[in-house]
Image (spheres, rainbow, N blue to C red):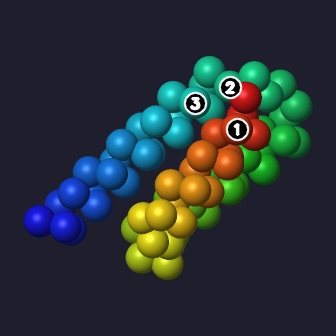
Amino acid sequence: MKRISFAVMVLFLALFSVQCATAGGVKDPGIQSRINELQKRIDNGIVTGELTRPEAVRVQRELDRIRE
């Protein structure tokens, strides 16, 4: 059950991050490129288990604040 709920959270974060990336206020292509790289690293850390749930939530929130 934990694995399924974790997978749902990963899917939600991935979909939410795509939505935020398209609606974000960052116009500089260099900054946007770095944000995209960081998002991929977060997603990969979640999938591989290198990030715990609290860590993933924290870094995702930080990245979302940068996007604003």
- Identify the amino acid type marked 2: Gly
Q: Is residue 57 left or right of residue 8?
A: right
- Identify the amino acid type marked 3: Cys
Along the line of sight, the residue nearer the viewer: 65 or 4: 65
Q: Is residue 37 visible?
A: yes
Inter-mark Cα distance, 3 to 1: 10 Å
Q: Which mark is residue 24?
A: 2
- Identify the amino acid type marked 1: Arg
**Of the image marks 2 and 1, the number of the one nearer the N terminus:** 2
Could you tell me which residue is drawn at 75 percent across and 40 percent down?
Answer: 66
Q: Which residue is mark 3?
A: 20
Helix, strand or loop at label 3? It is helix
**Of the image marks 3 and 1, the number of the one nearer the N terminus:** 3
Q: Kindly report which numbered mark, 3 or 1, lies closer to the viewer in this rendering.
A: 1
Asked whether the beta carbons under mark 2 and mark 3 sit within 8 Å of each other, the answer is yes
Which quadrant of the view contains residue 48? Answer: bottom left
- Please tell me how crowded label 3 is: few (under 14), some (14-19), or many (20+) other residues with Cα within 10 Å: some
Could you tell me which residue is drawn at 28 percent across and 61 percent down?
Answer: 6
Q: Which residue is mark 1?
A: 65
Helix, strand or loop at label 2? It is loop
Q: Is residue 48 above or below residue 43?
A: below
